[in-house]
Amino acid sequence: MLLKQQDFYRSLTAISPGLVERVRKVIEDAEKKFTGRKDGKAGFLWEHTVLVTGQAFKLAKTEKENADLAAVTALFHDAGKFDGGRYHAGRKPEEEGSARLARRVLEESGLGMADIGHVVRALRSLYAPGPARNRLADIVHDADFLSKSGYLGVANFFVKSTLRGRNLEAAAMEYLSRELTYASVLPANMRTAAARRLAAKKSADGLRFFKSYLAELNESHGLDLAVRAVDVRRAGARPRKARVSLVMPPSCGACGGKWETALRTEKGVKCETLEASFRCAACGERRSVSFCLPEMT
C-alpha cells in the first residue's frame, strides 16, 4: 500500500508533518503488544485504517465537509481497539480510548484546539447509541462500513474464515450469514448521501458474489446451504426489528430432521450481538451462528 501517494496523506502532512506516521506507530505498537508479533510487518489494523481514512477523505469532499478533519478522525477511529495492549480493556468502549489517544497525539502535533475538539467529539459519538448525529462521525461511520463491503468484503470473508480455522460449513454458516445480512442493509446503514450512492453498488456486488458462492459450494462440494430471512427483535426502549439472513443446511445432515431455531440478542461493548441456535428435533444435532447486528440509521 503506497501510503505517500494517498491524497489524505499529502493533505495531512502539509498541515502537520509526521502526524500520519505518529498515528501509525501508536496503532502498530498496540497491535503488536496484543498479538505478540515481532516480525516487523504491518498489521491488519493499520491497513484497514488507511482504507477507511482514504474513503473518509473522499466522502467528506463530496459532502462538502472538512476533508482533513474527517481524515484525522478516521485515522484514530480504531486506535483504541488494543489500548494498553488489550482488546476492549475493562469492557470500555474503544472509542473512549481512541478519543484519549487522539487528544494526546494531536496536541503533541500542534493541531489547533478547536480542531482537536471536533475530532474528539466525533470519535466519542461514532457508535454512541441515540438519535444525535455528528457529521464527522457520520462520514467515518460510512467510510468504515464501505471499506468492508463489496469485493473488499469478499476478501475479508476469506481472510477471517481462514485465520480462525473454521471448516467449510461452519465458516459458510457464520460468515455468510453476517456478510449477506450486512450487504442487504448496507445502503440503509449509510448516514450520508454520497455513501448511499456508493453502497448501492457495493451491496449488489456483495450479494451477487455470495449467492453465487453458495451455489458453487453446493455444486462442487455437495454442501447444501439455504438462505433464510428472519426478523429479529432489537434491544431498546422502542420496538424495532432487524431483517437478517441466516445461512444454514435446510435439514439436519445427520438424520434429515427439521431444525428448531432459537434467537436471542445481547448488548455488548461494541455492538448488539445475535445468537442463533439450531437444534435438530429428531436427533438433537446442534449448530449455531453469532454475529454483530448491523446498525440502522
Image: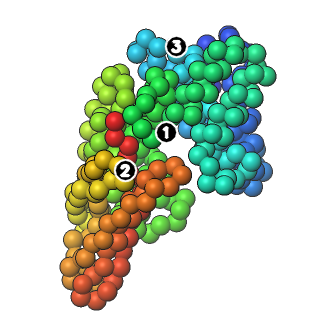
Residue behind mark 2: 236
Mark 3: amino acid: Asn
Establish if 169 lies above or below 101: below
Residue behind mark 1: 128
Name the element at disc 3: loop
Residue behind mark 3: 66
Instruction: State how far apart marks 1 and 3 are (Cα).
Output: 22 Å
Of pointers 2 and 3, the one earlier in the residue sequence: 3
- Coloring basis for residues: rainbow
Camera-near label (1 vs 3) is: 1
Residue at 35% in and 32% down:
190
Of pointers 1 and 3, the one earlier in the residue sequence: 3
The residue closer to the viewer here, 66 or 51, is 66
Which of the 4 image quarters holds residue 171? Answer: bottom left
Which x, y percent locates residue 291? 42, 57
Mark 2: amino acid: Gly
Instruction: State how far apart marks 2 and 1 are (Cα).
Output: 13 Å
In this picture, residue 61 sits left or right of residue 223: right
| Residue 232 visible to an observer of this rendering | yes
Camera-near label (2 vs 3) is: 2
The residue closer to the viewer here, 84 or 45, is 84
Residue at 40% in and 68% down:
170
Of pointers 2 and 1, the one earlier in the residue sequence: 1
